[in-house]
């Protein structure tokens, strides 16, 4: 499952912090690997907002049921 996350202050603090526990609970995952990455879509969205301090990244949650 992928979820976009917007940050303020050049990535220091999430505007709407992703709740990984909720994602895990909703998908009934037992073993989980989660990481934050910059995708091509994030790079396109970051052209202007990233310059003024509001970058976007993608939270990826993988796991087994």
Image: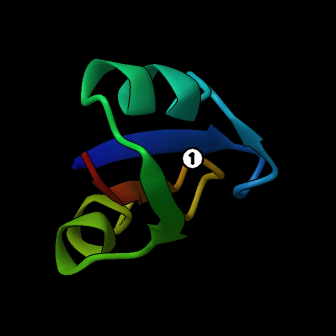
Q: Is residue 53 visible?
A: yes
Whether residue 43 is situated above or below residue 25 in the rendered picture: below
Q: For this rendering, which residue is in front, 31 or 6?
A: 31
User: Residue 41: percent from the left, percent from the top?
Assistant: 18, 68
Judging depth in this view, the residue of 18 and 63 nearest the camera is 63
Q: Quadrant of residue 11?
A: bottom right
| Residue 14, horizontal then vertical, whole percent | 66, 36
Q: In the displayed structure, does residue 49 sit left or right of residue 47?
A: right
Q: Residue drawn 53% across and 34% down? A: 20
Residue at image point 65% right, 52% down = 53
Quarter in which the C terminus is drawn = top left
Q: Position of residue 63 (x, y in %)?
A: 33, 58
Image spot of residue 36 (x, y percent):
52, 65
In the image, is residue 23 above or below residue 11? Answer: above
Task: Give the number of callouts.
Answer: 1
Residue at left offset 42%, top offset 33%: 24
* Residue named by callout 1: 54
């Amino acid at each position: 499952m992928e979820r976009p996350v917007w940050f303020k202050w050049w990535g220091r603090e999430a505007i709407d912090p992703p709740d990984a526990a909720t994602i895990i609970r909703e998908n009934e995952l037992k073993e989980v690997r989660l990481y934050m990455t910059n995708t091509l879509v994030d790079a396109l969205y970051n052209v202007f907002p990233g310059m003024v301090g509001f970058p976007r990244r993608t939270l990826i949650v993988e796991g087994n049921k």
